[in-house]
Amino acid sequence: MAGKGDDGGSGAMGTLGYEQARDELIEVVRRLEAGGTTLEESLALWERGEELAKVCRRWLDGARARLDAALAEGDAEDEADE
């Protein structure tokens, strides 16, 4: 598995799994909500959260595309059977 900086072929989060990204995003949000960080730390956390949200969005978009393709394939098979 890749480290914290891998982004899907375009740099930072390529092999970061959905669950890893989601869990880290939850932790980032928890830390931001808790406060007690400097402005610089808060900005870094915010930026990391944005990156993690993009990773999650890509995973979910990919899952939706696979599901749509499977449903379309199923519909095509049903039509062929009729």
Image: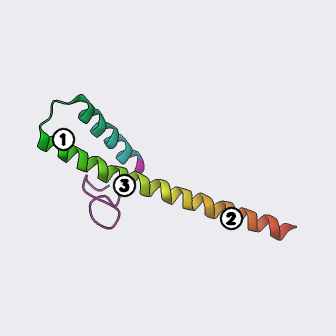
Instruction: State left or right for residue 67 relative to residue 50.
Output: right
Which residue extends farthest front?
39
Q: What's the residue at 11%, 37% (across, down)?
A: 38
Q: Nearer the viewer, residue 51 or 63?
A: 51
Considering only vertical position in the picture, is 15 above or below 76?
A: above
Per the image, the residue denoted by label 1 is 42
Label 3 vs 2, first from the N-terminus: 3
Q: Identify the amino acid type marked 2.
A: Ala
- Of the residues shown, which amino acid type is indicated by label 3? Lys
**Marks 1 and 3 in Cβ contact (< 8 Å):** no
Write the residue at 55% across / 57% down. Answer: 64
Determine whether the residue tagged by mark 1 lies in a helix, strand or loop.
helix
Residue at which label 3 appears:
54
Q: Residue furthest right?
A: 82
| Three-letter code for the amino acid on which mark 1 is drawn | Ser
Q: Which residue is mark 2?
A: 72
Q: How is the image coloured?
A: rainbow
Say which of 42 and 27 sits in front. Answer: 42
Q: Locate residue 70, reporting x and y percent.
A: 64, 61
Q: Is residue 17 visible?
A: no
Q: Is residue 6 magenta?
A: yes
**Along the line of sight, which residue is nearer the eye, 57 or 3?**
57
